[in-house]
Structure formats: C-alpha cells, structure tokens
Image (spheres, rainbow, N blue to C red):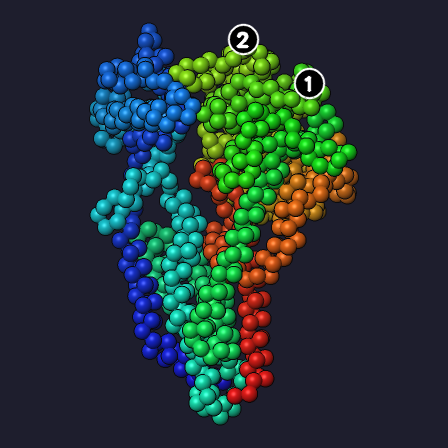
C-alpha cells in the first residue's frame, strides 16, 4: 500500500509544480471574493412596478368608466389626483392596428407614462382616502394598518397601506403582493428593485439555480483548467525512464495506472472542497442559507471531472502525449454535447404532442395536447384526428409545432353540455390579447368550432354540474355557461379596443357568493358532480362552497400550514377532499369540517400536477410532475403506486363514467384499465410517426449509453431541492419537466468503468 500512496503524492507534486494550478486556485478565490459582499435586507413591499398590473388596458378602462360616480370610489379619487395630461391620454387611448409597429410602440409608451404617474401617487401621502377605499375587502394586514391614524403611520407603513388599498380596489388587474420583499445588496449598493419573495423562496431559488450557474459558468472553465493541470500525469508516468523506475518496485501495472488516475482525482477533490466549502460559508454568513446539502457538490463535481479524466488518462496511456490527451477530451465533450442537443431538440418537438387533457364525449375519446390542440380518436384508422380547432389554431399550428414557442396556459375543460349537446372549452388566444376565449363544438358536426366570448379575468376551471350546465370558475366569481356562445346579441362589451366580459351579459350567468370572492393565484377548483359542491384552493386556503337556489355560498374555509404561495391541486368527492401542494404533501380532509385526517408524501417533495376522483368517490388518481401516477383508496386511506405501464412517462389520467381509468403515456398512447383488477380494458395506440420512432428506437439508445457529464447539475439540483422536476417558466404555475437526476450518474459511472478497464487491459498487455 505504501508504494501506491507514494505515487499519489507524486501526482500532487506534479500538479502543484504546474503554473496552471495557480490559475485554478485563483479562479476559486475570485469566485469567493465575488460572492462575499452579497447580502439582503427584508423590506416592506411598497410602490408599483409596471408588471405588477396584469392588464393595464382593463385597469384604465375601469378608472375611466367609474371616474364620475356619485359616491366616493377608488377610481373617482384616483382620477382627481391625476394630471390633465394623463387624463387625456387615458381618454384617448386606442388599440393599435394589427401589424403597426409604430402604433404599438406609441400604445406601450402611453401606458408606461400612465403607470409612471400612478406609481408616483402610490408612494405619496395624498393617495390614500379612507372614504374612497372604505368598500374594499379588508385583509388582516389592512385592518392592522388601519388601527393607527394614517398621518401617524411611519412613512413605509403609509406607502404599504397605499399599495394594498390599490390592490383591493382593482383585484382583477393588480397582483396581490406579499407584505415584505427582499432587497439584495452588494456592499452598500442596492441590486435592482426589491424582490417580492420570502427568505424561504430565496433559499429555494438559490438551491434550484445555483447548480446550473456553477456547472455552465464556473465549472466549464474550471474543468478545462483541471484537465490541463492533470493531463500530463499519465503521459509522463509512462515515459521509458519513469516507467522502468516505477515497475522496479513490487507493484501491479493495472494498479499503477489506477493509482495515477486516483491521484489526479484526489487533487481535484481538494480543489472542489475549497470551492464549495467557501461558498457554503459565504451563503451561510451573508445570506443566512446554512444548507448542508450544498456540500454534495464536492463529491459529485469531482465525479464529473473523473469522467472526463478517464478519457484523458486512456488517451495519454495510448499516445503518451499531453496535447493529444487534451484534444481527445475536447472531442469527447463535443460528442456528448451533440448527442444531448439532438435529443433535446427532437424531444422539444415530440413533447408538444403529449396529451394533457382526456375526456369522453358521446362515446368518443377526446384529447388535448400541451399546445392546446384538440383531437378525437378515430378507431377505424387507429389515429388521432384534429377536431374543434379555431381559425387562429388552424393558421398557426404548423409554426407552433415546429418553432420553440412558449407553452400556453392549459385549456379550460373540455366539458360536455348534454342540455345543448355541445362541447365547451376555453383557450388562450392572440385576438383577445392573451386572454381565454370560450368556444363550443357539436359532436354531431365533427366538432365544428364556434367561437364565443372572452372568459372573465383569471379564469381557473370549467367544470361539469348535475344539470349539465358547465360552471366557469374565476378568481373573482362563478358563472354558469347557459346561453349560446355564438349569439350576436351576446357579444361582450368592447371598450378602448379591448374585449371586456361582463358577468350578467351574454351566455354567462353569475352565481357567485353574496360577498365577492377573491381567490388569488396560484389557485385551482374542483366539483363533486354528485352534489355540485365546489372546492377551491387559493394561496394555502381551502374553501368549500354549497349550491343554493340562486348562487353558491361559502360553507367552510381553512388555511393549510406552510408557504401560502405554493401551487395546489385538489378534488372533492363524497368521501372527502384530497389536496396536493408544491412541496409534495397530500392532505386528506374531512368533506364537512375540512379537518385534516391524514398527510402523505409518496413522492417526497415532487409537486402533484393532477388530482382527480372516480365517479363513486372511492379512488383518487394523483399524477406528479415527474410523470409518476399514484392511486389513493379513500375508504382505507391508503396510497399505492398505480400498476400501469409508462410510469415515469405519464402525461395525464382521468376516470370514465364507467369507473375505469384512462392513462396517457408515450406521447399519444392512451390505455384504459379496470380499477378492480388494473387489467387493460382497451388501448388507443396509434403508430409512431417517423420522428418519434427515430427518437425512441435510435437516438434514445445512443443517448442512454452515452455518458452525460454535462447534466450533472440536474443531479445536484435534485439533491439540494429533493424535487425531481424543474419549472419551464417563471410563473408560479408554469409547467415542469422531469430532471431524471440519476441518469447522468449511472451512464457516466458505467462509461468511466469501461474506460478504466480498457486502460488496465492495455497496460497489462503492452510491452514497455
């Protein structure tokens, strides 16, 4: 053992004598010095940024409409404070012509100028008027601030009261804000504007994005420098003079090769420990993030180096040339990069066809893909046939399916209305400035699409009821869709060139509770089709509503523990209410009292994507964001992973009225299972298209066998966050994609073992 330890020491000496080593240590020290001055302060959330308002035209329209009310109102008060110039801009604001860049620029410029004056008023002492804002729904924070006379409040408290009063006056157009924000500071300088996040959200963000930034930024340079430092170890070892001296000792050739390899890795282990221990100390002392899981980066990133170094070592052994060794490593990196890019590019196109919604309509199976294109399964030809496409979808489908466009918000519904024999869904459209437009299709006419009105702001769900009339749930009310969507007399109001839906106009009849609701996002809704009882999740609250003679009334409400801004999913049945939150916790609640019966975390911290109950209410299906499906048996209150094919690749699931389970996997395949036996009842499996066939049976086998050192940040991200998925956007409810965190480890470990085995075999058989 002593000779091998001496060889490792020699490897350290060789690395230390290299000038390139000091470049690596300097980079690490510079990184520490760069991060050290970074800290944050917790401040009150005040002021108004442009993006805090979700719909400036809608807000401006409401202020203009209510500026002359007889009684005090927020709009009347705000109008009195605005300058004549700003009033004129609000009155003259017109929708820009389609395709006119100059008019669009002018339109955006005017709204930003209007925002500038309103933002200035909100931080001034003349904004708040008790009479004008007396009718807004008072939150706990507002009640606390109102306990003190406005003039006696501290300056920040007055500005905070102004902000929450503005939010309460225009809840449909202004995002609700958290009481405090985090102001990042670098030395004594503020970095940008305060972030509307809590400390726990900041910690989660750091742990989520830090592995990616380190891997693609610092380590891209650091690994190259590390290879330059260690690439000469193997070639120098097997030079004739050095090799004969080493082999004169009682050591094995193979163990000599592996020891030299371990020596190079040990040097990088020390450097990696210096880097991440320093970062851990800085984040702990400066940001208060004492996250010990960050130290997982030390062994993992050493392992990443070992994968590259196994290639360099073999090349150095065969050619005994440092330059060739480095060139082979670069070629290896380029190969891995090209395979990964090819896989991601092809998957980005194929995944747009993945099914996100399933329903049965008049004996036909209908699906909606992630890009919101509906299709009906044609049993005769064994394929999905596009149906119920709007004119806009027909015109843009080719572009949307090929180009890397953002994924749209999921459709509302689809829901079948048996009274009028029509299918109704809501889809985001460009013609409504990104708002959701309702549309209908008649199954008897091949689902010919008929456009309808714009849905209310922040629409959450379209749900079926006992009587068959679809119920539209928004953050600010409930609406029954009972009229003809395409009636000319029922067109929504148009003002300032924008479509404005009205609750008592057209096909929508309001059935909201007597007290106007405010179910802020992230929110979701579900209905028990057997009783029409409604369950709403909104920012950590669970609300149950019962249907009265003319409207819904709130029956029970509770607040769940934990971060309120977590995304939540739920469903309600006669057996109870099952709620799932972004931290992976499932809550089994009593239907009547909403008391918690039990908690589950079947997939750790992975977020549920979908929760749906069977018609009899005895079984709930829970689909997680990393495409794993679980079943919850309500009578026994037990969870089990569903025995279905495609686990890890499931995109959606639903129950039929017959009580069977439909599961979509492998992009467009749907399988129907009997719940009692979990045996396959029917399969809807169209043949794979050429691109998907090539992806699954040609590219994926190559990708699986090919090492993936460039994806180790996913493994680190999983170890830090314990979530096997990552968001695909900044929105709280953005879609997520699976990380597959252990793929890089297994494939790279196997590859490295093969490289080292080849090296051992080569040195054993070679004559020196």
Where residue 625 appears, as percent x and y from the top left, is 56, 43
Where residue 560 appears, as percent x and y from the top left, is 49, 36
Determine crowd level at label 1: few under 14, some 14-19, many 20+ residues with C-alpha closer than 10 A: some
Tag on residue 305? none
Side (left or right) of 625 relative to 55:
right
Distance, label 2 to label 1, CA atoms, is 21 Å
Where residue 113 appears, as percent x and y from the top left, is 28, 25
- The residue at the point 38 percent across, 72 percent down is 229
Callout 2 touching callout 1 (CB < 8 Å): no
- The residue at the point 29 percent across, 32 percent down is 46
Where residue 633 appears, as percent x and y from the top left, is 68, 40
Picture layout, residue 666 above or below residue 759: above
Nearer to us in this view, 327 or 479: 327
Picture layout, residue 447 above or below residue 768: above
Circle 1: element type: loop
- Residue 621 image-quadrant placement: top right
Side (left or right) of 249 relative to 419:
left
Picture layout, residue 268 above or below residue 674: below
Determine crowd level at label 2: few under 14, some 14-19, many 20+ residues with C-alpha closer than 10 A: few
- The residue at the point 30 percent across, 66 percent down is 26
Nearer to us in this view, 403 or 280: 403
Q: Earlier in the sequence, mark 2 or mark 1?
A: 1
Q: Tell me if I can see residue 585 in this picture.
A: no
For this orientation, the residue located farthest to the bottom is 248
* Residue depth check, mark 2 versus mark 1: number of the one nearer the observer: 2
Tag on residue 421? 1
- The residue at the point 48 percent across, 27 percent down is 430
Picture layout, residue 700 above or below residue 752: above
Query: Which residue has dot 2 on it?
Result: 489
Q: Tell me if I can see residue 365 in this picture.
A: yes
């Amino acid at each position: 053992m002593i000779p091998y330890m001496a060889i490792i020491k020699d490897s350290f000496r060789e690395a230390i004598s290299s000038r390139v080593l000091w470049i690596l240590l300097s980079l690490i020290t510079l990184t520490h010095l760069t991060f050290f001055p970074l800290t944050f302060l917790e401040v009150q959330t005040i002021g108004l940024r442009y993006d805090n308002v979700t719909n400036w035209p809608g807000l401006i329209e409401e202020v203009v409409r209510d500026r002359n009310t007889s009684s005090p109102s927020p709009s009347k008060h705000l109008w009195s404070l605005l300058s004549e110039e700003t009033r004129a801009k609000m009155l003259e604001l017109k929708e820009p012509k389609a395709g006119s860049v100059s008019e669009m620029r002018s339109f955006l410029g005017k709204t930003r100028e209007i925002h500038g004056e309103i933002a200035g008023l909100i931080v001034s002492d003349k904004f708040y008027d008790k009479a004008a804002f007396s009718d807004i729904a008072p939150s706990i924070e507002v009640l606390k601030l109102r306990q003190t006379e406005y003039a006696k409040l501290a300056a920040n408290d007055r500005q905070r009261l102004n902000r929450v009063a503005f939010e309460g006056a225009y809840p449909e157009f202004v995002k609700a804000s958290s009481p405090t924000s985090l102001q990042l500071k670098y030395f004594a300088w503020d970095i940008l504007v305060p972030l509307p996040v809590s400390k726990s959200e900041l910690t989660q963000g750091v742990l989520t994005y830090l592995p990616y930034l380190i891997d693609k930024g610092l380590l891209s340079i650091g690994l190259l420098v590390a290879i330059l430092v260690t690439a000469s170890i193997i070639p120098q070892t097997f030079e004739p003079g050095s090799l004969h001296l080493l082999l004169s000792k009682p050591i094995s050739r193979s163990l000599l090769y592996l020891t030299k390899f371990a020596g190079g890795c040990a040097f990088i282990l020390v450097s990696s420990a210096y880097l991440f221990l320093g970062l851990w100390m800085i984040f702990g002392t400066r940001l208060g993030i004492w996250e010990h899981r960050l130290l997982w980066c030390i062994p993992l990133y050493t392992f990443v180096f070992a994968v590259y170094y196994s290639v360099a070592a073999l090349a150095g052994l065969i050619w005994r040339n440092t330059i060739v060794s480095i060139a082979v490593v670069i070629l290896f990196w380029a190969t891995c990069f090209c395979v990964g890019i090819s896989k991601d590019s092809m998957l980005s196109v194929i995944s747009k066809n993945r099914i996100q919604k399933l329903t049965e309509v008049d004996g036909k199976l209908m699906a909606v893909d992630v890009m919101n294109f509906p299709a009906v399964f044609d049993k005769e030809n064994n394929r999905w046939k596009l149906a119920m496409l709007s004119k806009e979808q027909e015109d843009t489908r080719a572009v949307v399916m090929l180009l890397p466009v953002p994924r749209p918000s999921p459709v509302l519904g689809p829901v079948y209305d048996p009274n009028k024999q029509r299918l109704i869904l809501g889809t985001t459209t460009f013609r409504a400035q990104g708002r959701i437009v309702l549309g209908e299709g008649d199954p008897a006419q091949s689902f010919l699409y008929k456009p309808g009105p714009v849905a209310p702001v922040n629409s959450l769900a379209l749900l079926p009821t006992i009587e068959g009339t679809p119920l539209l749930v928004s953050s600010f009310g409930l609406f029954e869709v009972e009229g003809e969507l395409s009636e000319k007399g029922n067109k929504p109001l148009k003002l300032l060139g924008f479509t404005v839906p009205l609750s008592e106009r057209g096909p929508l009849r309001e059935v909201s509770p007597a007290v106007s609701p405010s179910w802020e996002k992230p929110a979701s809704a579900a209905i028990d089709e057997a009783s029409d009882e409604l369950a709403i999740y909104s920012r950590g609250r669970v609300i149950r509503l019962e249907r009265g003679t003319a409207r819904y009334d709130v029956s029970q409400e509770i607040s769940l523990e934990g971060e309120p801004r977590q995304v939540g999913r739920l469903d309600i049945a006669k057996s109870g209410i099952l709620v799932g939150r972004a931290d992976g916790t499932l809550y089994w609640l009593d239907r009547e009292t909403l008391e918690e019966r039990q908690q589950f975390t079947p997939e750790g911290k992975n977020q549920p994507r979908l929760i749906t109950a069977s018609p009899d209410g005895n079984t709930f299906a829970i689909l997680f964001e990393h495409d794993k499906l679980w079943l919850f048996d309500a009578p026994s209150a037990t969870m089990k992973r569903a025995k279905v094919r495609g686990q890890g690749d499931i995109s959606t699931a639903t129950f039929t009225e017959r009580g069977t389970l439909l599961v979509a996997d492998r992009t467009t395949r749907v399988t129907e299972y009997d719940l009692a036996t979990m045996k396959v009842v029917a399969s809807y499996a169209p043949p794979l298209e050429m691109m998907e066939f090539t992806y699954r049976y040609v590219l994926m086998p190559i990708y699986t066998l090919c090492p993936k050192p460039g994806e180790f940040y996913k493994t680190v991200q999983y170890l830090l966050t314990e979530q096997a998925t990552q968001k695909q956007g900044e929105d709280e409810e953005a879609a997520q994609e699976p990380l597959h965190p252990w793929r890089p480890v297994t494939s790279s470990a196997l590859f490295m073992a093969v490289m080292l085995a080849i090296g051992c075999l080569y040195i054993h058989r070679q004559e020196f």
